[in-house]
Image (cartoon, rainbow, N blue to C red):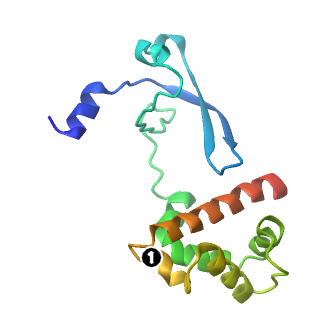
Amino acid sequence: MNEAQTAVNNAISFEVKKDGLQQRQSGDWKLGFTVASVDMDQRLSAAPMGTRYACVLVEVGDDEQPVNHKAQERDKWRELGPTRQAGIRCKEPLFWTFLIEELHFDNIHSEEMAAEAVRRHCQIGSRRELEIVGNHRQRMLWYGLDNGFQAWKVREHA
């Protein structure tokens, strides 16, 4: 039996409703769900705290069918890739403010200054380096920076 078949055979399927979302100081996210009592699986309630699970979520529409999110902005953003994402962010004055306030970069007032701050933060010489296969750490630094910006934007400018 392969890994995929093992996962299918041991899957716990139930409906949940999102009821909480919070970003931690570390940048990690805490996501809360409510499970109807009739859907609660004994394997989940009996498992000790800290038990890890692989998780797959599919949004369900009012018609009880999976919702197709292909056209949504977050997917479009992800498809751009980190190099183009960084290029777009560096043009945004609000991103400049984030870099100043949260990362304590000096007075950033241009796209080029923001680009230099991103390069320093991500430890790269060019934003194109974010696409290089071996630069996983640098890419993760970019994603952390962008996620931090988005969370900051919600907190400070909602």
Residue 83 at x, y percent in the picture: 52, 77
Q: Nearer the viewer, residue 29 or 35?
A: 29
Residue 35 at x, y percent in the picture: 54, 20
Q: Residue at 49% of width from left, 15% of height from top?
A: 45
Label 1 sits on residue: 131
Which element type, helix, strand or loop, lies under badge 1?
A: helix
Q: Residue at 73% of width from left, 76% of height from top?
A: 92
Q: How many marks?
A: 1
Left or right of 55 in this view: 74: right
Q: Nearer the viewer, residue 81 or 114?
A: 114
| 140, above or below 97, in the image | above
Query: How packed is label 1: few (under 14 Cα within 10 Å), some, or many (20 or more)?
Result: some
Left or right of 146 in this view: 127: left
| 80, above or below 42, in the image | below
| Residue 94 occupies quadrant | bottom right
Extreme residue toward the left, this view: 1
Residue 60 at x, y percent in the picture: 47, 35
| Residue 127 occupies quadrant | bottom right
| Residue 95 occupies quadrant | bottom right
| Quarter occupied by the C terminus | bottom right
Q: Nearer the viewer, residue 94 or 28?
A: 28
Q: Residue at 45% of width from left, 56% of height from top?
A: 70
Residue 78 at x, y percent in the picture: 50, 64
The three-letter amino acid code for the residue at tag 1 is: Glu
Left or right of 47 in this view: 141: right
| Quarter occupied by the N terminus | top left
Q: Nearer the viewer, residue 142 or 78?
A: 142
Q: Residue at 80% of width from left, 52% of height from top?
A: 155
